[in-house]
Amino acid sequence: MPHDTTLIGTVVAGLGVAFLMGALAHRLKISPIAGYLLAGVMVGPFTPGFVADTGLALQLAEIGVILLMFGVGLHFSLKDLLSVRRIAVPGAIVQMAVATGLGIALGLWQGWTLAGSAIFGLALSVASTVVLLRALQARDMVETEKGRIAVGWLIVEDLAMVLALVLLPAMFGSRGDEGNGIGLWQSAGIVGLKVVGFVAFMLIVARRILPWVLHWVAHTGSRELFRLAVLAIALGVAFGAAVVFDVSFALGAFFAGMILGETQLSRRAAEETLPLRDAFAVLFFVSVGMLFDPWVLIEQPGPVIATVAIIVFGKSLAAWAIVRAFGHPNQTALTVAVSLSQIGEFSFILAGLGVALKVMPDEARDLILAGSILSILFNPVFFTLMVKRIRADDVPEPEAVGDDVPAACNAGVVLIGYGRVGSHIGSLICGRGEGLTVIEDQKDMAAAAREAGATVIIGDATKDSILRQAGIEEAATLLIAIPEGVEAGAVVRKARAINPKLLIVARAHSDEEVADLVRRGADHVVMAERETASRMAERAMLARA
């Protein structure tokens, strides 16, 4: 392949094969992540045929991590982060210590040095940002208490890895400072000062500048410029944080998103980054698959099984016990434990550094990669089993309901979405004193609906459980105010299947969307352009009469 097309070839191969394998996985009713990982193996250097550029794939995957953490930050606040510090900080430290200890035991059993075994164990102790957040987002758990605990836990692990990546060269570098306690403490102190400096800069300076920039761009009326501003802020802050303050890309992006999340433009910013976020997240899984050598499963089956057991069971049991010890319910402990039962990007970086410093053997890196891909593959299965366990215990899902919502709502009208259109609909219905149930997945919009007097369900309206929670079986009318045609079509189809007598009114932006919504079961579809044209024509006729 010519050098100047390497990037194009990597993107095309990664996304193209990922689409085929993801579609096959969906057809077989297994997690699409399995398909993405297999796609990575297929275009990787350890299988015949086309070989994509692994280095480029990893850099593209890092963009996915940045955008994903930026998106999480948009729905997070400093208050949310501080609210879980009492469990996230000690919990992450203890859980990492347990996993590292188990890794040291396995490394010593393999005949490695204590230092190499310690790096190996540390690599097994930190969860993947992408896998954890994708799992939580797929189940609408990011903004729940258990989701906040898991994300806070992840932030602590992120900071610990930043510290480890800086201290390891000081401890085992070739500059003659090996074992130098003074140099080690100096490095640790510098890292601490940089992290504090970064947080201070973001909370004092960036907190004033970034929202002002985004509001200024929004007032220009250019959607293209707004999208560009959001991406520039997310990627620019992440890159600047890594270059200037030596913190991770993910941490920089998270703080950028958290600052913009305090503005009224947070929802729009999240929508603008969603397509790129999904595409680059797929490239992350492809990049993981590219690093995997299938032969390690045949050459070292015992160590591979032991490594996966540490990741999936060892540190998960530790996390579960810690959360339970802090008095949280079993479902919260299960969620956190399953969320952390995998490893990813930081583990690869740490493993690469350990091998480069000639402290950890290549064999250990192979086991880390095998443990990563297998744990990521198993993670969706464990989440499914966890959800079934929670339902079997008949424990209500607090993330799916509002603060004062009963087990099932009985309002005659159910409204999907409380944005610009939905809020006007809600104010008209609630203003007449009629009962209204709103399904909304954004906290700020949900709060506005609650203040207007509606009963609020926080969750994804495309899920049967959320629709039933809203009382769709007994409702008379369903109003779909969300602008996304694909999601609206899914809601129409599922709502019609649950309640055939339901009157469904939806909005659309094109003739194709109108036809699709009607085909799926909508009774009436309102297209904004048509309604605007009709009203303007009516006004013109009245003026001439």
Image (tube, rainbow, N blue to C red):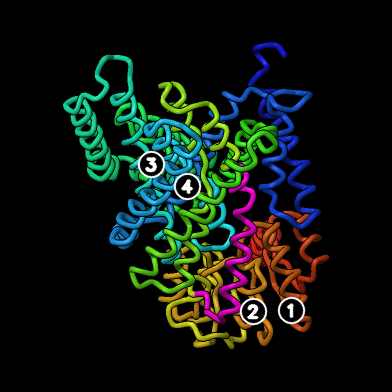
The residue that label 3 is drawn on is 251
Q: Secondary structure at mark 1?
A: helix
C-alpha gap between disc 4 and disc 2: 34 Å
Q: Can you give x and y, in whole percent of width and height, for residue 488 in the image? A: 68, 63
- Residue at disc 3, secondary structure: helix
Q: Residues within 10 Å of mark 2 (few under 14, many from 20)?
A: some
Q: In screen coordinates, is 173 left or right of 458?
A: left
Q: Residues within 10 Å of mark 3 (few under 14, many from 20)?
A: many
Stretch of the chain drawn in magenta:
373-397
- Name the amino acid type tagged 2: Arg
Rounded to the nearest angstrom, the CA distance separating label 2 from label 3 is 38 Å
Camera-side residue of 483 and 15 = 15
User: Which residue is the extreme one toward the right?
Assistant: 519
Q: Which residue is denoted by mark 4 in the rendering?
A: 127
Which label number is shown at residue 468?
A: 2
Q: Amino acid at mark 4?
A: Ala
Dominant secondary-structure state across the stretch colored magenta: helix
* Residue drawn at x 59%, y 69% as measured from the top left: 387
